[in-house]
Image (spheres, grey):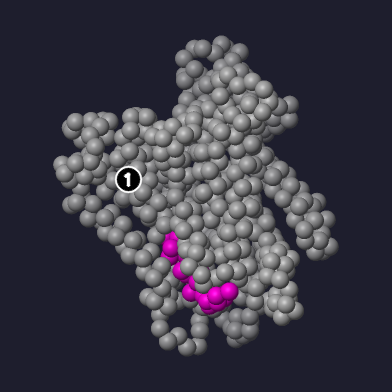
């Protein structure tokens, strides 16, 4: 029941996003199609004009409702229109080639930041009063307030440009062969972008874990466990941290939104060929079809990720599925 | 008006019987945060008197490092970086404050309406809140501002519209527990009107949550605006910390080793954001006694 509820909520959100996407070209001052055609400087033929009208769901000869219906059916067929930034590649192709990089980068960074952030949060709560435990939360709260893209710029400048330790662009070397070599090159290129996201997003997990754990530590069952003389490690791992982790997981939705936003900007700074970089190209070229498609794919990916977390949550906390 | 005064008064935390001293003034983190915020506001106000040159005048030798004539060097276009930094404080602070206040206002409105009214109003508002929570805000802001060609006011509005949901959710759950408290029930039974109950009983008791939401919304607005400007989606001819970074990036300041151009605006954003989060952090400690007590293990 819990999962059905969540799934229908995500479907509703998805519908809201595609409807917003449909209305955006209508809200724009001037004509979106005209703007795109003007930007393309005659590189696109008259067929493209029609294709664009279809993709935007804009056609002067139809009612709004008809336009909406046609827009939806095109979307259902995966027809997202033509991007002129990457012309003649269709938008769906651009997304197919950039999305995996972003998923990889965000996935890697999120896992690292979740694990390390929560571990540090456990430390900060358990050893409260020690100098390091007091400084950690403050340091990371402050770091969370730094602009992602600026942290990326600094990393790029210091570790890429000044010292030359890490590559300053791309996601993989040009002439790498062999599976291990490729993997190494990919990880090497992902280090700085991932580090940027980890550093700036870890604080949220850490402070959340610390504050939850501080509350949980004063619960009776933790005190009982201490009085029983259980080893510290066992109390923290099996009694306290497990219960403190649950609220953190429900906060995942919001945190993911921030990470996605930050990752988009980070990719731009590192010229990392993910969806954020494509979005940047779209924005600087006023490539509206590409922009819309990227927005839609980001929303879809975030909704799916949230649903997966809900699946996990219903396993971790069976109480939610019972009511 | 009453509401605005509550929002700006971080000390009116949940009503307690005896309060020997104001905890805000005895918290080092809060003091540092407040001091830094005050300093930034001061710079924003007296900016025109301490900028040394016209911020956009391209009249100096381009790409000079810091010197006594140009404290933070010059840009590749021959502008004085220090003057730009000082003038940029205004736009960045204005957007942060206004967008933060508007977002918090919406959050208070939605959160209290939801928690106080309950029933179908609560259901609809909660769904709306959750939709805005789950849609990543930065991509939404990016496509909205790319389509609508927004000025500063438009950007403030769009940031507020996309960032109220977090505050609304926490205020709603607080309001839900408050409406069941005895004193609220008594106030209702005593025949007080709904607005008397809300402004007299409920709102004062979630003041700390409102302020915390405001600080959070301000940080978010600061970072979002900087990100938009950095992408060139703001007004690129106006001087703000974000547009400074945009021009630095577009002129390849990094590859040319002109660190004095792209480091200061980021430090300014980070410092103002840090001041806001320090204040938020200490507010958390003051209002949540469990976080305050120290125990060395």
Q: Is residue A14 visible?
A: yes
Question: Where is A307 relative to A68, above or below?
Answer: below
Q: Between A268 and B146, which is closer to the camera in this rendering?
A: A268
Q: What is the quadrant of the N terminus of chain A in the image?
A: bottom right
Asked whether residue B294 is drawn in magenta, I would say yes
Q: Which residue is mark 1?
A: B264
Question: Where is B68 relative to A160, above or below?
Answer: below
Q: Residues within 10 Å of mark 1 (few under 14, many from 20)?
A: some
The chain that hosts pointer 1 is: B
Whole-percent x, y for residue B110 in the image: 57, 61
Question: Where is B22 relative to B119, above or below?
Answer: below
At horizontal 56% and vertical 61% (from top left) the residue drawn is: A207
Whole-percent x, y for residue A243 in the image: 71, 66
- Looking at the image, the residue that sits furthest to the left is B69
Q: What is the quadrant of the C terminus of chain A in the image?
A: bottom right
Q: From the viewer's perspective, is B189 left or right of A203?
A: right
At horizontal 38% and vertical 46% (from top left) the residue drawn is: B266
Asked whether residue B11 is drawn in magenta, I would say no
Magenta stretch, main secondary structure class: helix
Q: What residue range appears in magenta?
A: B276-297
Whole-percent x, y for residue B296 in the image: 55, 75
Describe the element under mark 1 as helix, strand or loop.
helix
């Amino acid at each position: 029941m819990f999962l059905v509820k969540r799934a229908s909520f995500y479907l509703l959100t998805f519908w809201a996003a595609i409807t917003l996407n449909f209305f955006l070209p209508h809200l724009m001052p001037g004509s979106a199609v005209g703007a795109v055609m003007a930007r393309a400087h005659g590189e696109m033929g008259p067929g493209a004009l029609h294709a664009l009208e279809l993709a935007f769901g804009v056609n002067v000869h139809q009612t709004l409702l008809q336009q909406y219906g046609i827009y939806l059916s095109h979307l259902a067929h995966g027809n997202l229109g033509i991007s002129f930034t990457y012309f003649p590649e269709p938008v769906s192709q651009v997304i197919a080639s950039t999305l995996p990089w972003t998923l990889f980068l965000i996935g890697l960074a999120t896992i690292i930041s979740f694990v390390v952030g929560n571990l540090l949060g456990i430390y900060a709560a358990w050893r409260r009063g020690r100098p390091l435990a007091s400084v950690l939360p403050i340091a990371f709260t402050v770091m969370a307030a730094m602009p992602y893209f600026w942290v990326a710029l600094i990393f790029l400048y210091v570790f890429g440009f000044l010292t030359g330790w890490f590559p300053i662009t791309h996601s993989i070397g040009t002439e790498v062969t062999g599976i291990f070599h490729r993997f190494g090159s990919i990880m090497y290129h992902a280090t700085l972008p991932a580090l940027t996201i980890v550093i700036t997003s870890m604080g949220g997990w850490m402070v959340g874990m610390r504050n939850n754990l501080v509350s949980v530590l004063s619960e009776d069952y933790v005190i009982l466990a201490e009085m029983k003389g259980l080893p510290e490690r066992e109390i923290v791992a099996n009694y306290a941290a497990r219960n403190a982790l649950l609220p953190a997981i429900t906060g995942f939705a919001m945190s993911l939104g921030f990470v996605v936003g930050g990752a988009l900007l980070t990719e731009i700074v590192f010229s990392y060929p993910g969806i954020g970089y494509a979005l940047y190209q779209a924005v600087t070229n006023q490539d509206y079809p590409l922009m819309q498609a990227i927005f839609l794919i980001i929303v879809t990916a975030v909704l799916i990720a949230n649903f997966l977390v809900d699946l996990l949550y219903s396993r971790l906390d069976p109480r939610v599925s019972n009511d | 008006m009453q509401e605005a005064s509550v929002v700006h008064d971080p000390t009116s935390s949940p009503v307690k019987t005896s309060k020997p001293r104001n905890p805000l003034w005895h918290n080092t983190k809060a003091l540092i945060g407040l001091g830094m915020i005050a300093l930034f506001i001061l710079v924003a106000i007296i900016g025109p008197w301490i900028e040394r040159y016209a911020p956009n005048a391209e009249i100096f030798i381009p790409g000079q490092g810091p010197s006594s004539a140009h404290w933070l060097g010059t840009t590749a276009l021959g502008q004085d970086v220090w003057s730009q930094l000082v003038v940029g404080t205004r736009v960045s602070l204005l957007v942060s404050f206004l967008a933060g206040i508007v977002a918090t206002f919406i959050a208070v409105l939605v959160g209290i309406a939801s928690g106080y009214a309950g029933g179908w109003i609560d259901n609809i508002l909660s769904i709306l809140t959750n939709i805005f929570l789950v849609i990543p805000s930065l991509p939404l802001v990016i496509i909205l501002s790319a389509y609508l060609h927004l000025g500063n006011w438009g950007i403030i509005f769009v940031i507020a519209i996309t960032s109220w949901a977090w505050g609304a959710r926490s205020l709603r759950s607080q309001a839900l527990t408050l409406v069941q408290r005895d004193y609220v029930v008594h106030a209702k039974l005593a025949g007080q009107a709904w607005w008397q109950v809300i402004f007299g009983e409920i709102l004062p008791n979630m003041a700390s949550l409102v302020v915390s939401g405001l600080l959070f919304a301000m940080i978010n607005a600061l970072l979002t605006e900087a990100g938009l400007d950095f992408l060139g989606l703001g007004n690129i001819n106006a001087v703000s910390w974000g547009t400074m970074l945009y021009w630095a990036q577009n002129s390849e300041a990094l590859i040319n080793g002109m660190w004095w151009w792209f480091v200061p605006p980021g430090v300014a954003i980070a410092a103002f954001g840090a001041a806001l989060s320090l204040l938020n952090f200490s507010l958390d400690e003051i209002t949540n006694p469990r976080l305050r007590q120290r125990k060395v293990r």
